[in-house]
Image: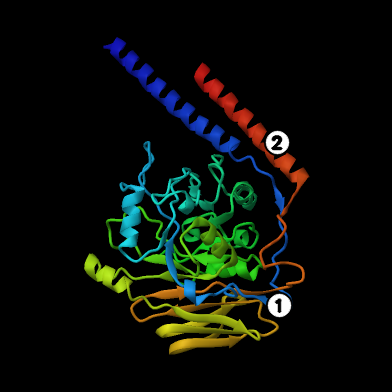
Amino acid sequence: MGKFASTGKKIVRALIKGVVTLVLVVFVYATISSVSPIYDFAAPHKFVGPDIYNPYKNLDTAHCWKRANFHTHTRVEGLSNECDHTPNEVLKAYENLGYNIVTFSNHNEQTSHPKGEEYQSNGYEHGYNLFKFHKLTFGADEVEHFDHLLPIWASQKQFQIELLTDDGDIVQINHPLRTPTLTKSQLEQLSGYKLIELDSGKSTENEYWDWALSAGRYSFGVANDDLHYPDRTSKIAVRCNFLCTPSARYEDILQTLSEGCFYSMRVPDYGKGDWEVKREKNRTLPYIKDIRLHDDEIFIRLSEPASHIKITGQGGTTLAECNDSDFIAYKMTETDTYARATAYFAEGEVIYTNPFARYDASKQANPFCVESPKIDIFLTILFNFLLFAICVAECYLIYRVIKR
């Protein structure tokens, strides 16, 4: 009996030792993956300048509007599947609901477009960290596999954005409301991305977009399904973007996304399970008939009356609003730093325009931050030396646990 008890104790001790070692190994990986430059971020500043950037300056009604979803998951090889359907099946599901453009964004993996190379965006969703700081990158030559397991600090997030912009065409911040460590102060600091995902389902106000815009961090807003279940009506065709672009080829999409000549939209789950109703209603969505800037006045005409339209500016302030109207006009004053419009419709549809923003056209082509934040050499050395010291201590603990 004593022999069995002794054997049992040895097994328990071995299991405890194994668990402790595994936990320490995870800590070591978290420490190593935390390596990052430390940036000296510029202080928040308002958009200023004698000119107003008009993202719709190249609006051509002959090419409007093509419906798109950019955040799309499909079946992939291996064990990390987040969707049971092939790219071709997902594409057909979207086309049946009136979409013209679909790009794929599987996690850390580029997916071939079923229609061929000219439609290939070389996009993917970067990030497998524990805090869901995910980015979508377009036009990447290869997948960037480095990620911080615990991206807590703004410098770590900025470093990830820098890595992706160095290798791709455009970087998008995904689902900010589902990223617990992405704070207001960080959105006031981060730059380098061009797109930010709107309206994750928790809010139609997108106040985090206004945090960044009010701090002089310009970006365009996109609304995507983040699709995993094309066979569920509540998961597909509930977020979308409408691009003024001549085709679904990547070169045309890239130009449109770079200039901002598109708007995003929240769409109800029409029929709530009835696919025929959903398809029919998706063919008759309200849309923007005209949007322009003339003598500093923003004018927007809709295809049908909205129950409420508002213009939002610095600090999320409402600059103008109207009810039961199919148009709104607002003349930006000299103190207005930016202005964006939101239109709410009776059945729950919501349209979001990209922001008009002040800048100096003689110095820059658009209001985006031109320079990356500078690296603080001293703090970078200190931070990474501290990580090295912690890693050494963790490895020593692993050694002690194994030796016992």
Quadrant including the N terminus: top left
Q: Which of 77 and 340 is in front in this view?
A: 77
Residue 277 image-quadrant placement: bottom left
Element on which disc 2 rests: helix
List x then y, in percent, for residue 145: 54, 39
Question: Residue 386's quadrant in the figure?
Answer: top right
The local secondary structure at tag 1 comes to strand
Question: Contact (CB < 8 A) between labels 2 and 1?
Answer: no
Q: Position of residue 175 (x, y in %)?
A: 47, 58
Amino acid type of the residue that numbered disc 2 sits on in the rendered structure: Phe
**Mark 1 highlights which residue?**
51
Identified by mark 1, the residue type is Asp
Q: Residues within 10 Å of mark 2 (few under 14, many from 20)?
A: few
In the rendered structure, the answer to whether residue 80 lies left or right of residue 369 reads left
Residue 165 in the image: above or below residue 291: above
In this rendering, the answer to whether 400 lies above or below 170 is above
Compared to residue 388, the image places residue 9 above or below, namely above
Q: Is any atom of residue 354 visible in this view?
A: yes
Query: Left or right: where does residue 142 sit relative to residue 307?
Result: right
Mark positioned earlier in the residue sequence (2 or 1): 1
In three-dimensional space, the C-alpha distance between marks 2 and 1, rounded to whole angstroms, equals 46 Å
Picture coordinates of residue 298, whole percent (x, y)? 58, 83
Give the residue at mark 2: 385
